[in-house]
Amino acid sequence: MIHAFLSGIKRFGRASLVATLAVVLMASFVGLSGRPAAASAADCQTSFLVFTDPNNVGTISTHGDIVRIRKSGIIGQYTSGRFEDFAISGLQEITLNQATGKATIVGSFVATSPDQQSSFTLRYTGRADLVANTASGRFHALNGTGDLKGLRAAGTIAADYLGNFTFSGADIGLC
């Protein structure tokens, strides 16, 4: 599977590499199995749709089997829950070991209300296994402004890959 993944990267070029990694790694925030969240978390989650910013794929460096992508843009929006329609915009760092298919991601974004009067920062970390199509991660939300002043939350992220460098998932614990 990794060989096919890497062949596709060569075919589509660097921008696709970054977009593919960002998408796969955004799924890194919990399994791709689509399992429902635990009952206690079911009441406290916010769904999202995110993808790599095509205007900012980041800086790519390769050393042997290790690919690092720095300052790659991530954009999208929350699609349900308390923060429905908040716009997402931020940056992430990705490290992929091409030999093992394992990757890590660290990033943050600002989520801004539709009226642009409120926002918060969400920081996240995750690990992905591109061979097994599994991933896990955590987030911390803070620095609320406007109606969200004092917002603090922490939890996990679950996402599914939709194709075209897009992920749909939920921040479990963000309410």
Image: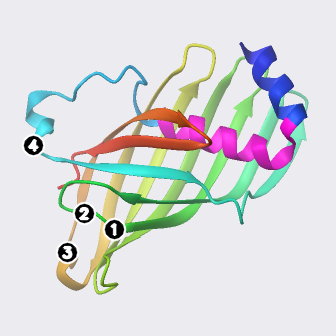
Separation (CA) of disc 4 from disc 3: 21 Å
**What is the number of the mark on residue 86?**
1
110 sits left or right of 99 in the view: left
Secondary element at image label 3: loop
The reply to whether the C-beta atoms of the residues labelled 1 and 3 are less than 8 Å apart is no
Q: Residue at x 31, y 55 (%)?
A: 79
Secondary element at image label 4: loop
Residue matched to label 4? 43
In the picture shown, does residue 82 fall above or below 104? below
Q: Residue at x 77, y 41 (%)?
A: 17
Work out whether residue 132 or residue 168 is closer to the camera in this orientation and state it: 168
Separation (CA) of disc 1 from disc 3: 17 Å
Q: Which quadrant of the rendered structure holds the C terminus?
A: bottom left
**Mark 2 or mark 4, which is nearer the start of the sequence?**
4
Count residues near mark 4 (Cα–Cα under 10 Å), then give few for <14, some for 14-19, many for 20+: some
Point out residue 23 in the picture as x, y percentages from the top left corner.
Answer: 58, 41
The reply to whether the C-beta atoms of the residues labelled 3 and 2 are less than 8 Å apart is no
Q: Which residues are magenta?
A: 12-28
Q: Residue at x 90, y 33 (%)?
A: 10
**Mark 4 or mark 1, which is nearer the start of the sequence?**
4
Q: Nearer the viewer, mark 3 or mark 2?
A: 2
